[in-house]
Image (cartoon, rainbow, N blue to C red):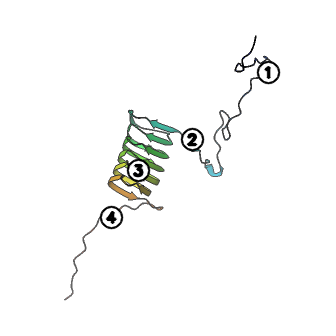
């Protein structure tokens, strides 16, 4: 029988099937991720983050747990979400409360957003409600309607109410 150049050559049963080595940095099955001294974990490659993508035309309500990265292309309504990164795409809507390290808003967020590091509002982005962040970047066309609070390294003091100055008294 003639073989074509694309047909696999038969292997004798006595030879083991070749296996691919794991990609660099991958841990063997069942192994726990490396832990550095002090309990700190090494920084993870963004491609390895646990990501939840809510696609266009999809609506999600409830609680999101254990997502490191949340990408909203559809609609999400949630009472409180803790994640590392939030990305709201153009046309995406997030309603509720979220606390993240970094956020990029190109869609709409309506509620309370706390960003411990950087908040970027793209030209198509709208922030409605309260946004707290350490760093803020708003592109031309980006909208913020509501309240912005800038976080500092120390505990964020609550603003005190403005008091009217006391009338000056004169001594006679």
Give how far apart the Cα atoms at labels 3 and 1 are.
Answer: 58 Å
| Residue 15 numbered mark, or none | 1
| Residue 122 numbered mark, or none | 3
Question: Badges 1 and 2: C-beta atoms under 8 Å apart?
Answer: no
Residue with the mark numbered 2? 47
Give how far apart the Cα atoms at labels 3 and 2 are.
Answer: 23 Å
Give how far apart the Cα atoms at labels 3 and 4 are.
Answer: 32 Å
Q: Nearer the viewer, mark 3 or mark 4?
A: 3
Q: Nearer the viewer, residue 61 or 144?
A: 144
Question: Badges 4 and 1: C-beta atoms under 8 Å apart?
Answer: no
Q: In terms of sequence position, does the residue under pointer 1 or pointer 2 come before the other?
A: 1
Q: Residue at x 75, y 13 (%)?
A: 2
Residue with the mark numbered 4? 160
As drawn, the residue found furthest toward the top would be 1
Q: Nearer the viewer, residue 82 or 39?
A: 82
Give how far apart the Cα atoms at labels 4 and 1 are.
Answer: 78 Å
Q: Which quadrant is the C terminus positioned in? A: bottom left
Q: In terms of sequence position, does the residue under pointer 3 or pointer 2 come before the other?
A: 2
Determine whether, in the image, residue 2 is placed left or right of residue 113.
right
């Amino acid at each position: 029988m003639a073989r074509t150049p694309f047909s696999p050559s038969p292997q004798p049963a006595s030879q083991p099937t070749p296996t691919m080595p794991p990609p660099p940095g991958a841990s063997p099955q069942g192994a726990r991720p490396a832990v550095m001294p002090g309990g700190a974990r090494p920084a993870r490659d963004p491609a390895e983050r646990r990501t939840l993508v809510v696609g266009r035309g999809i609506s999600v309500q409830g609680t999101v747990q254990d997502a490191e990265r949340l990408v909203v292309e559809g609609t999400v309504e949630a009472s409180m979400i803790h994640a590392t990164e939030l990305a709201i795409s153009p046309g995406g809507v997030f309603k509720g409360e979220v606390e993240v390290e970094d956020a990029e808003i190109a869609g709409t967020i309506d509620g309370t957003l706390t960003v411990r590091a950087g908040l970027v509002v793209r030209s198509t982005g709208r922030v409605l409600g309260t946004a707290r962040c350490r760093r803020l970047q708003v592109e031309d066309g980006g909208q913020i309607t509501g309240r912005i609070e800038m976080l500092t390294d120390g505990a964020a003091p609550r603003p005190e109410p403005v008091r009217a100055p006391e009338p000056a008294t004169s001594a006679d």
